[in-house]
Amino acid sequence: MKILSVNAGSSSLKFQMYEMPEEKVLISGVFERIGIKGSCYTIKLNGEKTTKEANLSDHKDAVKILVDELIANKIIYDLNEIKGIGHRIVQGADKFDRSVIIDDVVLKTISDLSSLAPLHNPAAVIGIEAFKEMIPNAVAVAVFDTSFHQTMEEETYLYALPYEWYTDYQVRKYGAHGTSHKYVANRLSELLNKKDGKFIVCHLGNGGSITAVKDGKCVDTSMGFTPNAGLVMGTRCGDIDASIIPYMMEKANMTPKDIDNAINKQSGLLGISGVSSDSRDIDEGISEGNERCILAKKMFVRRVVDYIAKYYVLLNGADAIAFTAGIGENSITMRKQIIEKLAILGVELDEERNNVRGKEQLITSNNSKIPCYIIPTDEEGMIAMDTYNLIEG
Ligand code: AMP
């Protein structure tokens, strides 16, 4: 069965087509600069990438070209071969605790949640509508970044703010990266042959979050009302004292929009280093002796360790810790610095095992009290699997 996994942004559309249930990737790609001058798309087929210019005035143009490419490359002969389309949705709030088939009510709910994810949910709605128009017979499925975190208890997801902020304005912790955390936690269960394990999953990419998972369920996660909370990220600040915001608004005459931009786009590794949001550039700065790059990496490591320690206590121990996403999978030095700070928990790095990128692997010694693994994440595969499972009933 052919299933498309789709991630629509406001000016981009990523896709991956699978043969299911084998989870074989047939073709993948990304459409960029949709509705902006200089639009183009890249297709990856049989390990080869091709980029082409194209006039993409809206998402429908992108879907039309996608369909043409699928036929031209003989991935499909007929549109009806595409049985399902799984859409990544950033914010499902407390309305969705699992993936669902999209009908008019679901679509309206996703749209109504736009105020909680103003950059993402409207783009997803546009993507869903474009695919519905071009490929009407495929079952559309919504897979939410937030649904895995819906098992958190009230005492965990509430902020100690006026209760009416929650009841009247939906202010609470929702988390994000749920599809990735769920995939990695499931993979740890398989690797350890332990269905009822206590796992700490570290998704460290440009955005980063850590989740405490018990018996396959999320107990707590570091992202909050928005993805801004928790870790030091590429350009997001993570946890700060909330009073800094009104202070800076007054002192520097900043508007809510200025503040939003500062805490989401100008902070984190970029804000501290003044060099870049990319951990590879930070490492380069460190090798040149750049003090602020050294400080940025120290702060990143420190916050990750803080959360691991907090979740270790919350879970009353841990059966395994996993590292995933761009930094978690690829940064040998970041993993080393994090794991070395966990010595008090009896965690012991194996430098040779850790000397790898992007590969599923145990990276701690055989004596380590808690095994740590690299588990490359597969959000697209999870979206395809949820879509397949809902179609199969
Ligand atoms: P993601 O958001 O998951 O794509 O992750 C992006 C982050 O992963 C960036 O900070 C990259 O610098 C980092 N990253 C990707 N590849 C490597 C690598 N080979 N070594 C170190 N960091 C990497």
Image (cartoon, rainbow, N blue to C red):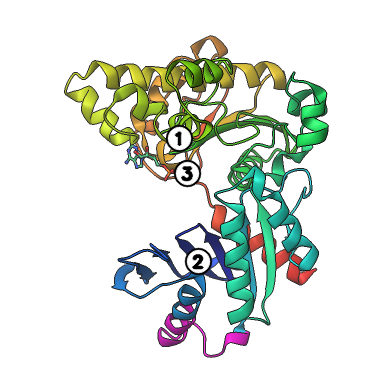
User: At which x and y percent is residue 187?
Assistant: 61, 45
Helix, strand or loop: magenta stretch: helix
Residues packed near mark 3 inside 10 Å, few (<14), some (14 to 19) or many (20 plus): some
Q: Is residue 345 magenta?
A: no
Q: Tell whether 156 sits left or right of 268.
A: right
Q: Secondary structure at mark 3?
A: loop
The residue located at (69%, 37%) in the rendering is: 174
Q: Amino acid at mark 2?
A: Gln
Residue 201 in sight here: no
CA separation in Å, label 1 and label 3: 36 Å
Mark 3 = which residue?
360
Residues packed near mark 2 inside 10 Å, few (<14), some (14 to 19) or many (20 plus): many
Q: Amino acid at mark 3?
A: Glu
**Nearest-to-viewer mark from 2 and 1:** 1
Residue 53: image quadrant is: bottom left
First reached walking from the N terminus: tag 1 or tag 3: 1
**Closest to the observer: 251 or 31?**
251
Mark 1 = which residue?
261
Q: Is mark 1 within 8 Å of ligand 1?
A: no
- Name above or below for residue 143 compared with residue 365: below
The residue located at (55%, 33%) in the rendering is: 209
Q: Secondary structure at mark 2?
A: strand
CA separation in Å, label 3 and label 2: 21 Å
> Which span of residues is magenta-colored?
66-80
